Image (cartoon, coloured by chain):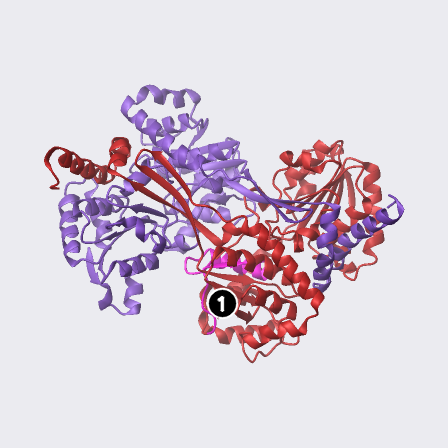
Chain colours: A purple, B red
Amino acid sequence: MQTLVWNALDNSQQNAILARPALGDSAKLSALVSDIIAQVKSTGDDALRELTAKFDQLELPHLQVSQAEIDASEDELGDEIKQAIKLAKDQIDKFHQAQVAPVIKVETSPGVVCELHTQPIESVGLYIPGGTAPLPSTVLMLATPARIAGCKRLVLATPPGKDGKIKAEIRYAAKICQIDEIYMVGGAQAIAALAYGTQSIQKVLKIFGPGNSFVTEAKQQVSQDHQGASIDMPAGPSEVLVIADENANPEFVAADLLSQAEHGRDSQVILVTNSAKQAKACEAEVNRQVALLPRQEIATAALSHSRVIITESIEQSIKVSNQYAPEHLIVQTQNARALLPQLENAGSIFLGEYSPESAGDYASGTNHVLPTYGYTRTYSSLSLADFTKRYTVQELTAQGIQAIGPAIMNLAAAESLDAHKNAVAVRLQHLAKQSTGGTQS
Amino acid sequence: MQTLVWNALDNSQQNAILARPALGDSAKLSALVSDIIAQVKSTGDDALRELTAKFDQLELPHLQVSQAEIDASEDELGDEIKQAIKLAKDQIDKFHQAQVAPVIKVETSPGVVCELHTQPIESVGLYIPGGTAPLPSTVLMLATPARIAGCKRLVLATPPGKDGKIKAEIRYAAKICQIDEIYMVGGAQAIAALAYGTQSIQKVLKIFGPGNSFVTEAKQQVSQDHQGASIDMPAGPSEVLVIADENANPEFVAADLLSQAEHGRDSQVILVTNSAKQAKACEAEVNRQVALLPRQEIATAALSHSRVIITESIEQSIKVSNQYAPEHLIVQTQNARALLPQLENAGSIFLGEYSPESAGDYASGTNHVLPTYGYTRTYSSLSLADFTKRYTVQELTAQGIQAIGPAIMNLAAAESLDAHKNAVAVRLQHLAKQSTGGTQS
């Protein structure tokens, strides 16, 4: 890890060390993905089989996982992991249940009632990456809020393993979330199938979940097409920033940095500390712990472009974090909670020495689908709201339209929209007639 | 307006009559807009001046509206319109104030506290279209929630009129919302300036507001660029669907249809009624009223591709509306409120005979920036939440990590993420040592 003293850098150097890495040749990726999407739109299931043969070297007998295969996960797994999956689901459930939005109802003037309601999005696609590790936790993070929101159709897509099967942990997580539609397809082709539908897979309205650069690019492309599907959020490599003071336990800090570094070679890991001594201690601990990891090679690659930034104060550490806008922000300082009001632009914040990122990744109850790549400045952490849409309702009585009608007519006239004005005028005239001469209209 | 009987159509005909019109040559528009954005990125203010000269035939002495010009609006306007603008702001304020999200805090297990917070988006760009009519109402709809959210910088961009000035109504609405940064620039070039910044205009993080096809395309493009800006929502032509039964007042229904039709030639206007008699009466009223409108030509163009759909029942009318997914849904039936639970996919719903669309457009208090073009299926009506971002916080005590730590370790192991497991293990070992042998770590 490169160690830098913040105050020794000028403004442009500071910006440079907090800049995200570029994401490779996007024009080439974009063209490749666009071809895959076109192929799925054109030949549907056949394209899915061909692309799975090409990219996953697998001949699939069928695309959909049968209910028997889903149910079999119960017997394939030991009690310990099943209990852990259930505990995580229970935690996530509690936190997302608390997010159910009440109807907001305001009488803005006598006889003018305005309401804000939410409704579930009818059908949602949940993408679960395959790759080096199966991710049952992501099934829980996506399916639990979708169920609470009341989405009618939950469709899970995930690439099969080398044995042509979906890992039992993923099937089990899906089972306890009552997902009965699981398709063995991954990559850009899975996103295309979810967005446009094929013979076997009915299209969905919105697609959620993380993925590699092909998946991310495919999600962007289908979200730009009116005939495609909405998506949860844009994505980039995963990242963590740790603010530590001199009291932090270097063993904990190092373990947290490494738990991000092992995600992928492109992971961003940043330690910001106001103690040069702490910086050294953490780096020594990182070097000690990384040597023991099975994913040492990946973590080392990530660490090679990661940074230790030494600041003059905790306040300056916070400033650096707010500027970087991290996905995960771990605060290992004395009285971490007191800093909360000053922390900006973070997807999920972990306060104090017993709150590792792993807790949020799996089982604290918060969602682990978070904005990355600086998108925390404007995008939200995944929550129940993302599985619903807000809409408004208004109801005016005769008294209500009489009260605000003249103002509406004035505003409509100022905007040269006479029909808008007239829609109020006909009602006010009708009411005036009623009050003077009976009910003819 | 074309009149159709729903039950006389087969499925594909039903889909066809509810389909949105295509949006013209998107590849050509995309290239034009992409050039404009590149020009603004490259030469900044100079590009803004050149493009304003080209598209608006105006030589601007300065881009920014001075505080004196903003303040002068107070004297340029009569009391009536100023009162109307203030009343509308007050109504919008009441409804959006009620949307302030409380912190949600849940102890998911003893010692595991999860929280959902919101924070304002630091800087927002508010785009106000020019064109045939100035829209002070849109200033209020965007600036009021931005102020309530606590956004630090509110930047308004709007094209100048032929006199090289911004209409007094817009300056006045901005003034009472305490906006002091107003730029005289419109179109795709305004969106580019807001997203990337120029010498005079500092970039913003998120851009809001309606606009023509150039503005909409520019918003899409900058939102796809990591260096650009987020946007409120995708957009298409504005639309209304009215559900009327035999009791509805045809004069009211016709006025509501026309208030949508006058927006633009591409406006969509749909009447759905279970009464053939009502359909005839409404059409006669539309023909009578349209002849009296200053914007008759625009409204007539919109009506030429609009539809009257005759259904067999109110239930079927609702089904048609849910399938169409309208931006505005007006329900003029007996006991309209009782239908609310069955209404899906509408941006804003107007219940009963005294709730015209104009009320929501200006002064009921609801926001008039709504998803169009079928996007109500997944996107939300603009609300306070759009000016903020949600993020989570978690804090675990020693007891908390001891309770859920073993499950986290199991899940991390199942996902082959050893460093994730280790981040918990080092803490549990530390606590075990503390409880057996003092505080060394």
Give the left or right position of residue B356, taking residue A205 as reference: right
Looking at the image, residue A76 lies above or below residue A31: above
Residue sitting at x 17%, y 51%: A282
Towards the viewer: B302 or B122: B122
Q: Image height check: is B168 above or below B326?
A: below
**What is the quadrant of residue B16 in the picture?**
top right
Residue A250 visible in the current orientation: yes
The residue lying toward the viewer, choosing from B280 and A413, is A413
Label 1 secondary element: helix
Eyeballing the image, is B112 above or below B73? above
Query: Does the magenta run of residues contain A179?
Result: no
Q: Position of residue B164 (x, y in %)?
A: 62, 76
User: Which quadrant of the figure has residue B329?
Assistant: top right
Indicate the chain on which mark 1 is placed: B
Q: Is residue A323 left or right of residue B51?
A: left
Out of A345 and B234, give the one closest to the viewer. Answer: A345
- Left or right of residue B312, residue B108 in this image: left
Q: Name the kind of residue labelled 1 in the image.
A: Ala
